[in-house]
Amino acid sequence: MSKHSRPSGRRVFGVLLASVSLALIGACGGDDSDSGSDSEALQELGENEGQVSILTWPGYVEDGSNDPEVDWVTPFEQETGCEVTSKVYGTSDEAFNLAKTGEYDVIAASGDLSLRLVAADEAAPVNTDLVSNYDGIFDFLKDTEWNSVDGVNYGIPHGYGANLLMFNTDVVQPEPTSWSAVFDDASKYKGKVTAYDSPIYIADAALYLMKHNPELEIENPYALDEDQLAAAVDLLKAQRENIGEYWSDYLKQISAFETGDSVVGTSWQVIVNSLDSANIKAILPEEGSTAWNDTWMLSSQAENVNCAYAWMDYIVSPKANATATEYFGEAPNSEAACAETVNPDHCEIFHAGDEAFSEQLWYWRTPIAECLDGRTDVECTDYSQWTAAWTEIKG
Amino acid sequence: MTAEPQEMAASRTPGAAISAFLSRRPWVRLTALLSVPLLWLVLVYVVALAALLVTALWTTDSFTGEIDKTWSLDNIETVLTTALYRTVTLRTLGLAVLVTLIDVTIALPIAFFMAKVASRRTQRILVVAVLTPLWASYLVKAYAWRSVLSGGGLFEWLGQPFDVQSPGYGMTALVITEAYLWLPFVILPIYAGFDRVPDSLLEASGDLGGSGPQTLRWVVMPMIVPAVVAGAIFSFSLTLGDYIAVNIVGGTNQLLGNLVYTNVGAANNLPLAAAIALIPIAIMIVFLTAVRRTGALENL
């Protein structure tokens, strides 16, 4: 080997240094800092962009791929020329992270997500004048605390419904009428009880305590001070002994009930519908229930704003709203939609438009330090404490 | 030969010009050559690890999910002092050790048979058989175990005559699933290890009066320890980081991976997730240091 081709130690170091700096220059790309969303809602609609991407609960955006009979996306695509892509999520927390990626134009959000989106500047104000079907929507769903902030509207109401108690009638006898089936009496079905895998499930325990342990003085299951949260955590820790598995993926919940690995637990009407089995029943227990009230929101990072408006207008139109809410198993958002349901009693079953009933349901909210029930003498536990409590409950 | 005519010829095409340029400047050549692998190494390993460590020192605003970039040791302190993280760490560690032990126990005789007993033809078939499960997706295999172990599933059906119940979803199911998933990764290095042991040594040991077990203990084992360690590193580290199989067959149990996942996915608390992720890294460092002490790494 010649003298020239043998590098000295120092020169090797030099080369390495040069390579590393080259590598680092390549690595340090531009950090795109988001210039906060403008708080002005769109004033006028333009031409449709040709596509729209939607982040949604399962069962809200059906294009026939799950069931060829169930398809309300294709008519929309034909009507507007907006190609729909959709992504399904299992919990509001998951949706929050997905929404932050900015890949979605429209988001179907429950009350425990909508305000977080607004607070994180991920939601854009919605000009309801551009949504022609907005007028027909029940008034009590409009301008609520989970879709409006300081008089600015951030979304279009879609529908609402309760979390149900689902059980296998072959095993769970006598038929339960109370949430005690998954709390105080859960040991009867040890290892076959299931619960929703999200910190928001703490509110279900709090609602149960609200009705059964009045001395705790819980007024609102989303406004818990530290003692009340501790009581709910204790109840859930006791419940955990009897839990077979938690669920957040609704397909896993379906398979667990099909095989009999789970026989009783909290569920959604859409799961009952998918199971479509004679021995699976779901009820609204006597304590009432936690519930969701969903809103179509516009992402502040939306690239296809016009198609997004077109989708929001379409999905709240009586026909589409009736089909979607009936499929999911929840109350539609307008009187006109009730007239369009396949089952004429659908709206009666789900108490659509019944304000008094709606007030008995505890719609998902994000717990915050400032007590939602109006107490000012004590600080409430916020969602991060709920999250910490939830991982602790699961152990 | 002089340099001049060569250079004139080289400058005719751009490719040749570049190669001539590089041939005269070995430092540029070496820098260009090393940049890509170093970029990879620095980006994927060093920067990622550093980012993890730095993120662990930040905090999150729980309502908006924005990351607050003021330095604090809160997350590390939480992870070190909360009983929950100790329990989960011990559970994860226990699972990883158990899975590794089971896999090594199963893999040793299989690998020995493949390398030393089976005919050439059987050997090839066995290698294919061991490799085949790797063609199926991880998820398919995990869900397959979910249905095997479910109520009225294959396990219960096979166990019925012997009055054996399915363990249901939980730690037992998880041990079975993980042991199954990582078995090929343990068999293959051990098989390669056995394959490297010359038959003549076994014969020599026999000729000198060594019994079968003696030969295995004093001749074969020292030679395949590095292979066993390699297999063990695979099953141990793969189990340590897993969180998907836990969700599928683990029942209510959480492992470290799940805590990281919930904190990234559900709680949106990236800093805490980063702090938790430091636990398996610390465990792996301790594990690899211990392995290095035995000298097994040098023989890999």
Image: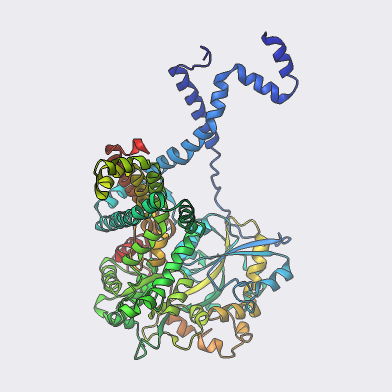
- Residue placed furthest toward the top: B2
A311 lies above or below A279: above
Residue A276, compared with residue A113, is above or below; it is: below
Q: In the current view of this chain or complex, which residue is farthest to the front?
A: B207
Pick the front one: B61 or A26? A26
Is residue B238 visible in the rendered image? The answer is no
Would residue B72 be found to the left or right of residue A45 on screen? left
Residue for point 49% across, 53% down:
B121
Query: Residue B70 placed where, x, y %?
Result: 37, 43
Nearer the observer, B225 or A15: B225
Q: Is residue A104 left or right of residue A272?
A: right
Q: Where is residue A341 shown, x and y percent of the image?
A: 61, 85
Residue at image point 62% right, 65% down: A127
Left or right of residue A2, residue B266 in this image: left
Q: Of A62 and A6, which appears nearest the observer?
A: A6
Residue A199 appears in the picture as rendered: yes
| x then y, percent, for residue A93 | 45, 62
Question: Residue A151's x, y, as percent?
Answer: 53, 65
Q: Is residue A241 above or below residue B109?
A: below
Which quadrant of the figure has residue A84?
bottom right
Picture colour scheme: rainbow
Q: Quadrant of residue B7?
A: top right
Quadrant position of the N terminus of chain B in the picture: top right
What count of labels does the image hold?
Answer: 0
Q: In which quadrant is the C terminus of chain B drawn?
A: top left
